[in-house]
Amino acid sequence: MLVCDGAMGTMLYAKGVFINKSFDALNLAQPDLVAEVHQEYVRAGADIVETNTFGANRIKLGQFGLADRLHAINEQGAKIARHAAGDCAYVAGAIGPLGIRIEPWGKTGVDEAREYFREQAQALADGGVDLFILETFRDQNEIGAAIDAVRLVSNLPIIAQMTTEEDGNTLDGTPPERFAPELERRGATVIGVNCAVGPAPMLDTIERMAGVTTRKLSAQPNAGKPRDVEGRNIYLCSPDYMASYARRFILHNVRIVGGCCGTTPEHIRQIKMAVRGVAPATARPAEAQIVSTPAAAIGASHAKAGPSVSLGAGAKAGPPVLTPPVAREQKSRLAQAMARGAFVVAVELLPPRGFQTDQAIERAKRLKARGVDVVNIPDGYRAGARLSALSLAVLIEQHAGIETLLHYACRDRNLIGIQSDLLGAHAMRLRNVLLVTVDPGRVGDYPDATAVFDVDSIGLTNVVARLNQGSDIGGQAIGAPTAFHIGVSVNPSAANLDQELRRFEYKAEAGAEFVVTRPVFDAAAFDAFRKRIETARLPIVAGVFPFESVRNAEFMANEVPGVRVPDALIDRMRRADGAEAAAREGIAIARDIAAALRGSVQGVQISTPSGDIETALAVLDGLR
């Protein structure tokens, strides 16, 4: 039985280090302060001290402009811990998550993540750690990449710990019955959980893990949930309480106990006294035996894991299909039309400001009467308080009798919220979705509003594809599969076209069923682009955008990223005499482009600068 230390961050904060600083950089800036914390835990009886390197990876250090100091920070962290531990404790190289999403939920590939972890693991190994501890991971794909990375540089023992909610599932919803066997398969020496919850819910999780893995376990709970006391977060679990649960953990094959956030040296002192009476203590061996002894103390092998397979930066990964997916032609009228090769027309309808929807519903009715197949509802507008796209789509389908194509944006939503939104949309009979990332810029009526991204459109496509297979992102069954008709976007005029094409390929692999392009202003250039994506065999709906004025045309040409307007079109707009003539010319240009595209695409999406459906219908009339 080994006792690990407590919360380095908690102790540094208590010693006056502000939370907006890089705690890892203190290894170089204030090494004596870091050593002091280590020594306090060693004096309290810790058998393992973790290096102060939880966030010392390239991504997190880069946020502080310290990426170039990565090796020095990690190596020094290991040396500080080694000096403080002396012959009394082992040194564990601490590695935390990258702080970004990796495939299949994010744009960072498993191979890239593995390299980020490898360089940190190498630096820790160079510093002389005895073992590695991977902790506070929420994504089993990411911790798998970290395990692989450590194995590339070392055969030392690996403690691999996920972080869970009170229900025992990870923050992404993966149950212990799934992640524990997976971590064993990936080659972790010890499997455990840490952070997020206190001792009682963690014990429930440990009991579930013990039933599905033969590996020894570790448990490092928080000292309860933090409570705000006069503006400070205080963890209120007493040392005695934490110690009582340490004894219970041991009964379920736990061989490493300790604490996470809020756990002080006094907590560790009480835990050490408690476990000493339950299991024999493991003394620190001589330095010559240090490489092999941690595994013996833990009671498990740390043989090198087998080779892993990289999936590429957008590939699908995860559980097999739980339920046969719904056939495409059965998903919606739009899906059926596309499946039989019909030409479809979509018109964009903006969500209104405020909550009054009568005008939007009437416009949708007019579009249906004029033969429009689907109303396109954009998401992610930040100009003031607008009705949500999802709400408007539901109301239009219910009251206007026309199908909608719901844009669903990643911005400002986390994975758990995304799943809830989509399941709610499906329950309200929405089927057609266009999955987009949306730009992060601070725009609209609230310039101080921020943008939050948990995934991008590739990850979002994987999420919806999983739901269509009857599984959530954690691999748990949701019952009947959803029947979303999945659309994705592509920009034929992207500044980095090779990157745009790679991203499109990832979306197609993830499960996209049709593609909608950004506005097309050059039919000849688009045809060359189309030939580069036709191998995906996805129906293409081309974006068409009528200029409403010369100024609007110039704005699109010069100020909108990712849009290219030929000079010839600008000249046509400039030759128009007056505002009305310019508006007519903008419609004529859009008609010409739509007519030129019609033979090579399966539909058009007409959007206008101000959401004017009369202009959209005028373009449609010319197309017919």
Image (cartoon, grey):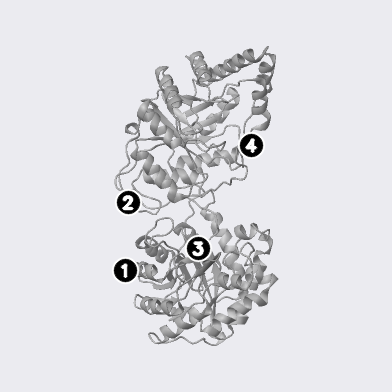
Residue 448 at x, y percent in the picture: 62, 45
Q: Amino acid at mark 2?
A: Ala
> Which is more N-terminal, label 2 or label 4?
2
Numbered mark located on residue 185 in the image: none
Please determine whether, in this image, residue 272 is positioned above or below residue 410: below
Q: Are marks 4 and 2 in contact (CB under 8 Å)?
A: no
> Which is more N-terminal, label 4 or label 3?
3
Real-space CA distance between mark 3 and mark 4, rounded to the nearest whole angstrom: 35 Å
Residue 567 visible within the image:
yes
Q: Which residue is mark 2?
A: 477
SS of the residue at dot 2? Answer: loop
Q: Amino acid at mark 3?
A: Asp
Q: Which residue is mark 1?
A: 211
Q: What residue sits 51% from the left and 13% below the top?
A: 622
SS of the residue at dot 4? Answer: loop
Q: Which residue is mark 4?
A: 495
Q: What residue sits 43% from the left and 55% below the top?
A: 172
Q: Which residue is mark 3?
A: 148
Q: Residues within 10 Å of mark 4 (few under 14, many from 20)?
A: few
> Which is more N-terminal, label 3 or label 2?
3
> Which is more N-terminal, label 1 or label 4?
1
Q: Amino acid at mark 4?
A: Ala
